[in-house]
Structure formats: structure tokens, C-alpha cells
Amino acid sequence: MSPPPARLRRIAVVGAGPAAVSTCDALRAQGYDGELLLHSAEPGLPYDRPPLSKDVLLGKARRADVLLRPERWYEEQRVQVREGARVRAIRPHSGGVELADGTVAGADRIVLATGGTPRPLPVPGGDDPAVHTLRTWEDAERLRERLLPGARVTVVGAGLIGAETAAVAVALGCRVTLVDPVPVPLAAVVGGDIAGALHRRHATEGIEVVTAGVTSVERGPRGLRVQLTGHEGPLTADLLVAGIGIRPATEAAEAAGLRVDNGVVVHPGQRTSHPNVFAVGDVARPDGHRVRHEHWEAAQRDGEAAALGILGRPAPDPGAPWFWSDRHGSRLEAVGTMADAGRHVLRGDPDSGAFTAFGLRGDRLVAAAAVDRARDIKAARRLIDRGVPLSAAELADEHTDLRALLRR
């Protein structure tokens, strides 16, 4: 039997992203006084990933600038960071994690914060050395060295990472082509109006946008030849960046017999199907939800919920999910689940470049997305979480103070 929370002596966290660090932070804040081991597969202290596709590629941020916590924080919080310690297996029944070198570190509880790995381009030639993905500091360094003025860059995938990378590349003077088979990427996430405005902005900034799929990548005398569906002739590129999503890193969880279905399935408090194991961040999918929330704040909140779950305390409702993305000098923010909306309402002028789209289901707000209108999103988040009854006319009217609606 596993020891009760009051007798926990050692907790092992597998992973080193924001969900992992948040778990450690929250455990200490909640009074846990035992050992905390954080196993990082990469060298160095844990760092933040969102800047990789922005300031790091632009050369504006160094590794020290994107650390999640300074070195002294780990010392003060007594978190043992084991760098370059890849975990190849977890042993929930006997209590411990097995490292790549075969050593086993005992633990009363295990937190899986293993994140995900970039989906490879699933076509012939997709493994060419000139085909890049962007997930780690090393990935960003390799890519940054190639983003030189005049370089021909093909970005495949116009989601968050692909769009941000394309925006950085064109800002650095590269000749950029953005390829996606979906005419309006992200429409299901932020609604067609916001997604359309964002996608059109690429062409305005000098990016060639192509609606097509990739069938193969091959080496030619002038660089990579990227064959597309329904496109006359191949694209020629010096490098290709594949930004087509991630796969949750569930290998250790599957081998240990945990319930896995598009991620490690978790219950309130981030509990998995084994009482000694918890899962947080990109690798975790709440039971009953269709998707995983692969965003920074969701990772933070998962860590806080896991700490409470480990200590046997109830976790609060996380509220509506929120995320942001920066590209071409503008910020996209979104909250809630736009797919749940039955009606979309616009606030502001789309032609101005700064406007908001609200998603209503009946008289309740379930989602909102905005470009450069942070106040709208801040208010929308509270309206969603409180379930305030609203009308489409109120939301659309620029004279309506959204904050005043919270007083109902």
C-alpha cells in the first residue's frame, strides 16, 4: 500500500517544463516538506518554451533569459534538479523511476510532466537534416543559425508554432512560404473571423501563403524540392520547418499500464488510473474532455492541482482555458472553447486589425478570441467562469462596459 499523504517522503517529477516546476512550487507552498526530485532529460536548468519561437529565434533572448526559475530558487525550495536524467520507465507499484542508465530512484509519488514530441513530417524525405522542428533549446539554436537574410524557408503548418516561426523568419529577412492544407487554420479554435484575419496578415507581411498538403521532400541541385498537392511544380527551399503539432510523450505511462487515450487520462487533482501516479501539462488529458490543453497557463494550473491531489486536498475548478500567441507585432488571446459556441458575435472593426469574437451558447458566453484587445479577454474570462447571462447585442456594442456585466 502507498503511504498516506502525511507520510510522503519523496516525490519524483519526470519532466522539466512549466507543469513540472509548477508542481514543485505548489507542493512547497502547500507545506510538503519531503524530498523533491525533478528529472530533466535535457542539460541545464528548466526553461520556458514559448520564447523559443519568438525572442530566441530573433536572437533577443539567451538561455539565462528564459529560465523558469533562477538557480537559487531550486536551492531555496530544496528541489533536486537531475539534469540529463532521462527516465525510461516508471514503477508505480514498487515506487520509483528507472533512469536510462538503469539506476532506480525510489519515490512515494510520481508526477509525469513528460510533455510531447513534435510530430515528424510524415512524407518521404521528411527526415532530411534540412527539415526542422521546434520544441527544445537545441532545436531553436539549430534553426536560428539557418534563418539568414535571403534564406528560402518553407514552413509547413500554420497553427501557433508555424505561424510564429514564419513571422520571425520574414522579420529576419528570409523568403518565407507558409503551407497548410486548411484554408483558414485555427478557425475551430478561435472562430473564422479571427482566424481569417490572422491568416491574411501573413501575406500583408510578405509571406507567400499556399493552401496545400506536402507529399514529399527531396534534395535537388538548388536545395530542397517540396512537392505539394494540387500545386503546379514544387517549392524550392533551403530549409523546411514542420510545425504540425505534438504527440504526447506517453511511452512510460503506457508501459506501466496506465490508462492512455490521446494522453494520460487524468481525474480531478491530476490523478491517473494508478493512485501513486499523477500527470500534468501537455501529456495529460482530463477524463471526459475531447482535447488536451497544450498551453502555458494550463500547465501551470495542472501543477497546482496535482500538488493538492498528491496531498489529498480538493483541487479548485480550473476555470476556462486561456492562451496567447504573438506574431507580426500583434497578440492573439483566446479563452474558453470556441467549438462549444452556437453563435459568434463580433466587437470592434475587423478592418482595424484589433477586434474580438465572442462565442455564445444560448445566453451564456463560452469562448472569446481577440487580437490586441486584452481587456475584452480579461472580462470575457470572468463572464465565462461566472456564467453571467448575456445578449449578443450587449457584447457587440462597443459602448457596453463588459466589466459592468459582471455585477449582475
Image: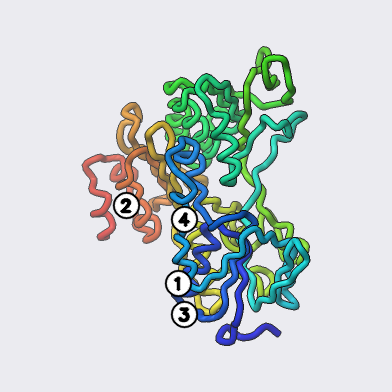
Element on which disc 3 rests? loop
* Tag shown at residue 76: 1
* Tag shown at residue 31: 3
Element on which disc 1 rests? helix
Residue 351: image x %, image y %? 34, 26
Q: Nearer the viewer, mark 4 or mark 1?
A: 1
Relative vertical location of residue 248 with respect to residue 327 in this rendering, above or below: below
Residues 287 and 237: in front is 237
Tell me the distance, in whole angstroms, between the alpha carbons under discs 2 and 1: 36 Å
- The reply, left or right, for residue 146 in relation to residue 338 is right
How many residues crowd around disc 2 within 10 Å: few (fewer than 14), some, or many (20 or more)?
Answer: some
Q: Which is nearer the N-term, disc 2 or disc 1? A: 1
Q: Quadrant of residue 76?
A: bottom left
Q: Which is nearer the N-term, disc 4 or disc 1? A: 1
How many residues crowd around disc 1 within 10 Å: few (fewer than 14), some, or many (20 or more)?
Answer: few
Tell me the distance, in whole angstroms, between the alpha carbons under discs 3 and 2: 33 Å
Relative vertical location of residue 227 with respect to residue 134 in this rendering, above or below: above
Q: Are marks 2 and 1 in contact (CB under 8 Å)?
A: no
Q: Which residue is mark 4?
A: 297
Q: Quadrant of the N terminus?
A: bottom right
Mark 1 residue type: Glu
- The reply, left or right, for residue 170 in relation to residue 82 is left
Task: Name the residue: 70% across, 35% down.
Answer: 121
Element on which disc 4 rests? helix
* Tag shown at residue 379: 2
- The reply, left or right, for residue 167 in relation to residue 408 is right
Mark 2 residue type: Ala
